[in-house]
Each structure stands twice: as structure tokens, then as C-alpha cells.
Image: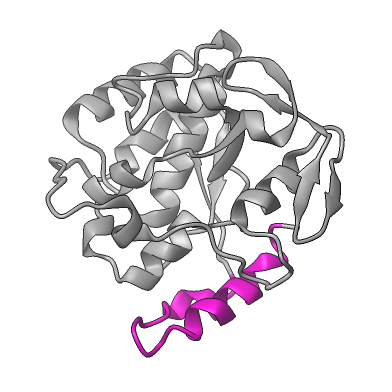
Amino acid sequence: MRSAIRTALAGVLACTVVVLTAPAHAADAPVEHGVALHQAVAKLPVAAEERTGYNRESSFGGWIDADLNGCNTRAEVLLDEAVTAPTVTGTCTLSGGSWYSWYDDTTVTGARALDIDHLVPLAEAWDSGASHWTKARRVAYANYLDDPRHLVAVTARANRSKADQDPAAWMPPSAGATCRYTADWLSVKLTWGLSIDAAEHDALDELAADCPDQDIVYSPVP
């Protein structure tokens, strides 16, 4: 379902051309790259972070309904990740269903108990390069459905414990999630060309070294 949103998201962003300029990448076919986990940290530029000017709503906007089907990005992720599908009524109202929050190894019933986590938080993305993007590109980042590693349905408890922290300060409480989270964090940063700071670099380097090597496949967003 997420891949089907790509064209619709491009159309929605293109409609904002009076205020924003839609990124040219939206209509381009993705090009896959691959790198071994143990080499991935070295591919990311190291730079100091800068929070100046950040405001979550004005910088990235909120959830959008890219394909105009009545379901916004939050609902699309919930529908995509459901272990037991919820009932959908009205204007994409979800009831019932169950989900697995892999951050804390917890099964959740009822969508209201879940948050949708930006695996690399919006504030972290801003600090790491997104402050220099167009608004349209930031909206695309906040609502990115092409890759399920970017947005994750997790317990509200885990998401709010994480807040906007990077792996130097926070990791999922489930020990079984460590290597997956590390690889996915690196994937998102590589996909969007984001930098890492010195503490983040050292933490990721140590985390990756303790994980079995694996290939990280990602499609850079120009």
C-alpha cells in the first residue's frame, strides 16, 4: 500500500506550487544502493547539529492524505502494519485490530494506543540537514510511505520515551530490536543524505560492530 502512495504524494505536493516547489525526485524512479552495515556509518558525513529555527508544525507540517482516499499518513501506516486488520468505517475511522510494537516487544489492540514514530525524528532530521531543504521536501519526509523503515507504529510509551533522541541517547528497550533499529536508522539517514554528529557516529559505530553484518539497501531521495 505504501508504494502506491508515491504518485499521489507527488501530486499533492505539486498542488502546493503557489507556496512551495515540489521536489523533482517525486516523479523519478528510485535507484537502489547497497552497503554493508559495518561500512554504513563511514558513508555518512559527520557534522555538528543545529536546532535554530525548528518548529515541528511550521517546519514539517502534519499528516496529509496524499492519495485523497480519506486516510492520512498515520492511518495508512496503521493499516499497512496491522497484524489483525482493523475495521474501517466512515472517513477512515479505525476500530479493532492489533499491532506489534517491535521497539518494546509488545502487542497492542486498538489504534489509539499507538503512535506513529518517525524513526529518525523530525527534529533530528532538521538538525542533520533538513533545515536547508524546501518545505515541500520536509513535508515529503514527514509523510514518507515508500519505505516502511521510515514510519513505524509503536506504543505511545516507547515513542514518547524516545522523543527526538538519536541512538547516542536512546535505543529501543527490547534487546531484540537493537540491530534492526541500528540498520534502519542508518538506512533513513542514507536515503535522505542526512549527517550524523560525533556522539551519534560513535554510538552507531559501536552498535553496528556488535550486530551481524547485513546489507542495507536504500534508494536515495535526490
Left or right position of 111 against 11:
right
Q: Is residue 171 left or right of residue 102?
A: left
Residue placed most toward the observer, 16 or 207: 16
- Identify the residue at the far front of this view: 90
Residue 107 seen in this snapshot: yes
Horizontal side of residue 37 vs 113, given as left or right: left
Q: Residue drawn 41% across and 20% down?
A: 161
Asked if the stretch drawn in magenta spans residue 92, the answer is no
What colour-coding does the image apply?
A: one colour
Residue 60 placement (x, y as % from top left) = 36, 59
The one of 2 and 203 positioned closer to us in this rendering: 2
Does residue 1 sit above or below 182 in this rendering? below
Residue 220 to residue 88: above or below: below
State which quadrant residue 69 falls in. bottom right
Where is residue 181 drawn, in percent x and y?
Answer: 51, 27
Q: Quadrant of residue 20?
A: bottom left
Q: Which residues make up the magenta segment?
A: 2-29
Q: Does 21 lie within the magenta span?
A: yes
Q: Is residue 177 left or right of residue 140?
A: right
| 87 in relation to 107, above or below | below
Q: Where is residue 22 shown, x and y percent of the image?
A: 42, 80
Task: Report whether residue 213 is seen.
Answer: no
Q: Nearer the viewer, residue 14 or 25?
A: 14
Residue 33 vs 208, above or below: the answer is: below
Q: Residue at x 49, y 18 (%)?
A: 172
Residue in view at x 39 percent, y 41 percent: 121
Q: Residue at x 43, y 38 (%)?
A: 186
Q: Residue furthest bottom?
A: 18
Q: Position of residue 167 (x, y in %)?
A: 35, 24
